[in-house]
Every structure is written in structure tokens, then in C-alpha cells.
Amino acid sequence: MKKRIPENFIIGAGSSAWQTEGWKGKKEGQDSYLDTWYKNEKQVWHEGYGPGVATNFYERYQEDVDLMKEIGLTHFRTSINWSRFFIDYETLEVDEDYAAYIDRFVDSLIKAGVTPMLCLEHYELPTYLQDKYDGWSSKKVVALFTQYAEIVFDRYADRVKYWFTFNEPVVIQTRTYLDAIRYPHEQDTKKWMQWNYHKVLATAKVVEIYHRKNYDGQIGIVLNPEVTYPRSSSEADKKAAEMYDLFFNRIYLDPLVKGSYPEELFPLLKKHGIQFDYTKEEIDSIAHNTVDYLGINLYYPNRVKAPSYQWNEQTPFHPAYYYDHFELPGRKMNKSRGWEIYPQMMVDFGMRIKNDYENIPWIVTENGMGIEDEERFMDSNGVVQDDYRIEFISEHLNCLIEVTEAGSNCKGYMLWAFTDCVSPMNAFKNRYGLVRIDLNNNRDRSLKKSAFWYKNLIESRTFEV
Ligand code: BGP
């Protein structure tokens, strides 16, 4: 069956600064949190490949822009690397070399007819701010981020009309302070909550500036809500799903879209001894500065059940007090990444936005398929035959269009990723791109089968399902 893409529905692709740029031109002291993690934990590199060269987008962006044009991409999302934008993070002296590079690639995108969408932080917290202020634990970092945003808007907002404050703001502190898999390897739920709260506050502050200074465009945030399904319709399982949703989804969606936190959240945290710092003025600022639109990253569904273990009073509080993960028997999987494939989540999420979140405009900023050892699918002409990716995109796009036609205010779909790129967890192990990056051959680019398919989809505005 042929499916038609609605008029004005954006079809694009994305990446981020740190995952593509490489370290060329990076000055001493300009490390981000992830640079430091990669420097300290060598096992996260993939066969010696990592962020050092990445895809060398810094020097080779023009080739990528040419390929975007060839494929017919109308929108491209990436980020500005906060850790490289300044020579000094306190006086906010701009690194003019880096800022001029942003000028060049933004201009090059526009010239090619590709609309740029920029995010201010895609895991690029400067290590300096992490070390000096304990990162997002500090209100000083909220203030510095707000100033950074204003400098960036003053410089690029005449040409860039789509902005996001953060990409997946919940992730870093969840890995660090809930899962404790990163330094300092200590669980600290209070700090986790403080970081979440400060990122919401920072977004409100940036939205306030963006609106007050009347820049011509839209300001939003990229979230990764996990569409959460209970194992069964039992009250206990449903409660587990509700609690997961509260701690990981509503903690951002509610204040950013509706202007207020879920009523039950702060008392619940207090009950568990999690008392973080907030003021009435800040809560007011959050109430008055909600986002214009949402970027939503959707890869896999989340399934939970009632917790099976007993917590004792001495254990420091963790949201998993209320849920346990659950694997659906017989589920369809992307085995490389260990993620379930369930396109219906697009429909369920779209209806949620429509019914519970004022039908705010939203766009899928990420969805895609990371595959290990993708070279094995290369044909004799050197083209990766990624039919699995084509199937994945068709199924998800089909559901997304279905929910858009049912009235959810979805504005488009951006594939992750335009080219293969470095993943925070395992470098180049899983390949996501429409465009292959040849690691053994100077990071040369070549189109995969999915890129030709995407080109056809954009040209014809139809695809087969
Ligand atoms: C999202 C991130 C991206 C990207 C993607 C794929 O969470 O925003 O930066 O990395 O996930 O996931 P991974 O790289 O972990 O396979």
C-alpha cells in the first residue's frame, strides 16, 4: 500500500556536534563531559575509533551538506558544542574560530536549501563547569547557560529559526547518579533531581530571553519520553507504569508544556527524603515560560511491572522503588542495540500529546536503527543494503502519519542519523546513518541503500508500507 506524506510535514535527519565534529581545532581546556569520559575510559572507544576524529564534520561539513542536497533533505538538526564555543566559560569570551565555523556551516546549509535546527546542549557540558561547580548541581551553571544562549541567539538567530535548549536532558544524570555507571559511581537521587530541575529552570530562563528579545523563530527542547506500558492490567502493574512515567517523563513534560510540576511529585520526593533547592521565583519563572514546541526522540517502548524486590529503610531512595523492568515475550528486537521495535508507540505518544499536553506542536527529532558490523551487508559495489533500516523507517513513519491524521500536532520526522557517528556509550559500534562513514578509509562518505530510498520518499512524498 502506498502512503502519502502530509503536506508541509518535515522529513529530515539529525546528528550532534560532539558525535561528529572531532577534535580538530579544539583548544586546550575545551573538553566536554563526554570528552573526559572517553579520555578516562578507553574501553568505550570502538576498535580505537571515537570522538577524536569522529566523522571530522568540523573539516568536512561541506561534503555532508552536498549529500543532504543530493538526497533532498529539507531539515537538518545538530548542536552547537558549548564546550568549544568559549575560550573562557566564566567571562564568556567566545572562541571566534569555532563561532566562525558555525557561521560557515549554517550558511552552507541555507545555501543548499536545508533548514538548520540547532540545539544548545547535546551532552556537551564543559568539563570545566562540571569540575568547578559540580555541573548542573549549581545555579551558577544555570546562569552561565542562559548567558551562553543569549550570545548564540544574538549571533545566529537571524538565520536559524528552530532552537532547542537540551537534547534528552534526563540522560546524563540518570546514567551518573541513578545507575551510577559513570564517575563518581555513586547513587545520589537528590543530585539527580537537582540536575533535572535546573535543566527545566534553565530552559525557562532561555525561553524567557528568546521571547522577550523577539527573535524570529521557535524555542523548544528535545525530550526522550519513554512510552511506558504495564505488563498487565492489574492495579499493581498499572501503578508501576504510572510511577515510571511520573519520574522520567512528566518530570519534564509537565513543567515545560503546562508550566507546573505534577502535584504529587514534590511531596513524594520529600517523603523519601529528597529535598532539593528551589525557590518560589524560580517556580514562577517556569510557570510563565513554557516552550513553543517539542522535539521528541523515540526509539523503543518501555515496559514495566510491579517491583518484585523489597527495599529496606536504609537503602537510599531510587525511583525503581516503584517499578521493575519487564521484557515482553516474543517481542520484535533490534538485537544490536538490545531495543524492542514497536512502531505503535508513535501512535500512543501522539495521542498523549493531543489529549494531555495541549496538543503542542512536536516533531520526532530522533528515531532510527543502530546496527553492529554493518559492513556485512555491503554489496559488491560497496553499497550497504540496509533493508532493515528502510523497513524500520517505513513502519514508524506510517504510525506517525496515522496519529498526525488523527489530529496530533506532529510537524515532522527526523531520522537519526544523517551519517554514521560516535555514540556516547560505544563510539562507532552501532551504525545509524543514511550515509556510511568508512573508518578505514579517511572517513569517506558513501550513500547506503536507505539514502536512495529516503531521496525517493522526499521527492515522491510517498512510500510503500
Ligand atoms: C539518543 C541520543 C543520540 C544518539 C541516539 C542513539 O539518545 O540523543 O545522541 O546517540 O540516542 O543511541 P546510541 O548512540 O546510544 O545507540
Image (cartoon, rainbow, N blue to C red):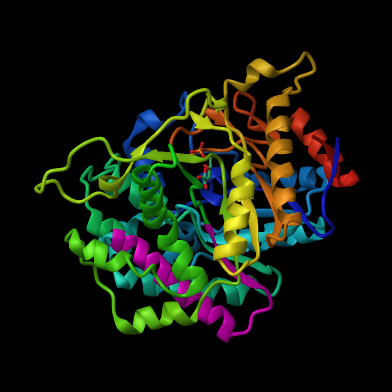
Query: Above or below — where is 391 with respect to 455?
Result: above
Residue at 45% x, 79% y: name it.
287
Outermost residue, top side: 380
Please identify the quadrant where the C terminus is shown.
Answer: top right
Residue 115, horizontal then vertical, whole percent = 74, 60
Quarter of the figure with residue 236: top left
The residue drawn where x is 54% and y is 29% is: 430
Image: magenta residue range = 193-222
Please indicate, yes or no, whether residue 386 appears anywhere in the rendered image: no
- Tell me residue 262's x, y (percent): 39, 67
Q: Outermost residue toward the left?
A: 314
Q: Is residue 417 magenta?
A: no
Residue 201: within the magenta? yes
**Taking 48 as reference, is 396 left or right?**
right
Residue at 58 percent across and 52 percent down: it is 349
Residue sitting nearer the eye, 339 or 63: 339
Relative height, residue 153 to residue 400 (above, below): below
Residue 92's quadrant in the figure? bottom left
Asked if residue 100 is positioned above or below residue 386 in the image, the reply reads below
Relative placement, left or right, of 274 versus 283 is left
Q: Position of residue 319 (x, y in %)?
A: 29, 50
Q: Is residue 338 visible?
A: yes
The kind of secondary structure the magenta stretch mainly shows is: helix
Farthest residue in the right direction?
A: 460
Quarter of the figure that contains the N terminus: top right
At which x and y percent is residue 125? 41, 57
How many numbered marks does the figure carry? 0
Task: Name which residue lies at 69% across and 75% down.
Answer: 158
Q: Nearer the viewer, residue 253 or 120?
A: 253
Side (left or right) of 456 relative to 180: right
Q: Residue furthest front?
A: 234
